[in-house]
Amino acid sequence: MAKLELKFDAMVGVYGGTFDPVHFGHLRTVLDVKEALGLQQVRLVPCSQPVHRGQPGATVEQRFTMLQKATEGLSGFVIDSREMGRDQPSYMIETLRSLRKQFPQQPLLLIIGGDAFGDIEKWFQWQQLFDYAHVVVMQRPGSHFENVNMQPFLQAKVTHKATDLAWLNHGHLYFQPVIQLDISATQIRQKVARHESIDFLLPDNIIKYITDNDLYQGDFTAL
Ligand code: ATP
């Protein structure tokens, strides 16, 4: 890997998800990563068709709109539509290839939650993710993934120095502690379907959007 002479603030975060809907568990944690690592921008990428789960309750256009509304006025947040046109499952490796063309030199940081990291070996061409980006895992305080059955391929990628992420533009695995918010989109969809309050779990303008568009009214008791 060639060493790059780059400024620390040139790093680009990539945060993919279903965001059905986006909530404070997504937003506060990724803001923690952005500030801790001094990222120039974070690109939130709603997937069109998730790979390992059923169809989302909201369309990708609605999920995109909710992301835009949730980050209005926040600097350094970009809602990225590149997966929206895909009529096949959204593979992160393809998204990273596309981003690498747009950002030929800058470090790309694929930001994922600890639960997603636990499943990373199931992702399509998962080892090649590290050919395009660093992987930053939003870590739960007190839990140390690197000590828990992590296979040698991943162990070899681990760095504990944030500065390493700026000097190479891909290839490292880094664990970032973030504020813990036990909020999930599943929980929010279920609450809407049961006519329970979703106040304080996500931004007010997203709650209004969900109400105005009659989202998540179906039977989610099986989820
Ligand atoms: P669902 O409940 O529908 O599965 P979710 O709330 O887990 O959704 P996703 O859109 O599937 O949200 O997740 C996108 C990314 O955000 C993943 O990397 C996931 O690990 C991370 N994430 C989701 N919720 C949290 C949270 N509360 N704290 C930290 N990371 C989170």
Image: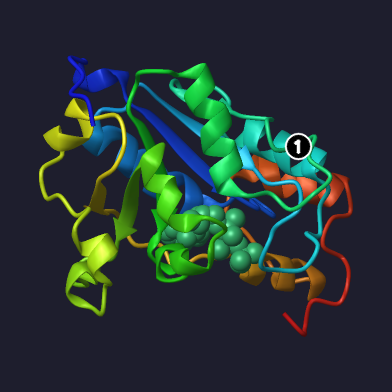
Mark 1 is on which residue type?
Answer: Met
Q: Is residue 2 above or below residue 60?
A: above
The C terminus sits in image quarter: bottom right
Number of numbered discs present?
A: 1
Which one is nearer the viewer's eye here, 3 or 209? 3
Is residue 200 at all visible to an observer of this figure? no
Question: Looking at the picture, how far across and down is residue 211, in whole percent?
Answer: 82, 51
The N terminus sits in image quarter: top left
Q: Is mark 1 within 8 Å of ligand 1?
A: no
**Residue that numbered label 1 is attached to:** 84
Q: How is the image coloured?
A: rainbow
The residue that appears at 47% across and 37% down in the rendered structure is 14
Question: Looking at the picture, how far across and down is residue 52, in whole percent?
Answer: 66, 67
Is residue 5 at all visible to an observer of this figure? yes
Tell me if mark 1 has few (under 14), some (14-19) or many (20+) residues whose alpha carbon lies within 10 angstroms of its own. some
Residue 172 horizontal side relative to residue 102, left or right: left
Question: Looking at the picture, how far across and down is residue 155, in whole percent?
Answer: 20, 63
Q: Residue furthest bottom?
A: 222
The residue that appears at 24% across and 34% down in the rendered structure is 37
Residue 27 horizontal side relative to residue 171, left or right: right
The residue that appears at 54% across and 33% down in the rendered structure is 97
Q: Is residue 46 above or below residue 11?
A: below
Q: Is residue 138 above or below residue 208?
A: below
Quadrant in which residue 40 is drawn: top left
Residue 85 horizontal side relative to residue 160, left or right: right
Quadrant in which residue 50 is drawn: bottom right
Question: Looking at the picture, how far across and down is residue 214, in whole percent?
Answer: 89, 54
The residue that appears at 15% across and 49% down in the rendered structure is 159
Quadrant in which residue 63 is drawn: top right
Element at label 1:
loop
